[in-house]
Image (cartoon, rainbow, N blue to C red):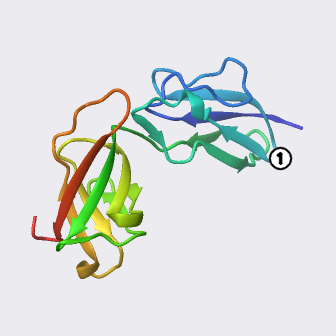
Amino acid sequence: MYSNPIVIEAKGAEGVRVENQAGLKVDKSGYAVISGSTAYMRNRVALRAEDIGQNVNIDDPVISDIVPTKYAVVKVKFDVRSGQSVLTTLSFNGKTVTTGASVIDIKTQKNVGLVGLNGQAFLSGVSSGQTLLVKWGEDTTEQCQLTLPTLSNRQTGYDEINVSCTAVGAH
């Protein structure tokens, strides 16, 4: 068996511990290095969810089945978003937005939430003035956009707001 390093990139997750690696944490630059992974075998890489801060969101803190080849250095990147959490009730043309709609950051094209019952969506990693696209179909008649109002900059908990979307392109 050969030992391979795994480089973890998790920018914005400083201080989060790496699972099953005693004392190993993501450093202030957003990196950690696991030494001793096994070549040609499945290696599980995970960040400890309980260490993730209130205003930090990691879409998937577990990446499994990293199978390095002999002498390979493997890089694993975690998608970290920092920002606030908001419980929104979304409406479009006077009706609540369809359950199952995706809420997407227009700038990064990353999903920041999913619409549930009664037009409610819990959004994470967002900020005041951010423009979002709400999408429940591919046609522009099945999409709307919104700009988040000023949020309270809470260190704990989340804001609750009602937001009306406008037709795509009407912003």
Q: Residue at x 64, y 46 (%)?
A: 63
In this figure, which residue is indicated by the disc labeled 1?
A: 41
Q: Answer yes or no: is residue 110 visible.
A: no
- Above or below residue 156? Residue 119 is below
Residues 160 and 100: in front is 160
Residue 29 placed where, x, y %? Answer: 45, 24
Residue 28 placed where, x, y %? Answer: 46, 20
Q: Residue at x 29, y 57 (%)?
A: 89
Residues 154 and 73: in front is 154
Tell me the amino acid under the disc marked 1.
Met
Question: Quadrant where the C terminus lies?
Answer: bottom left
In the orientation shown, which residue stands out farthest toward the left? 170
Q: Quadrant of residue 110?
A: bottom left
Residue 49 placed where, x, y %? Answer: 59, 35
* Left or right: 65 as drawn, with respect to 155: right
Question: Quadrant where the N terminus lies?
Answer: top right
Residue 107 placed where, x, y %? Answer: 26, 54
- Above or below residue 131? Residue 126 is above
Q: Secondary structure at mark 1?
A: loop
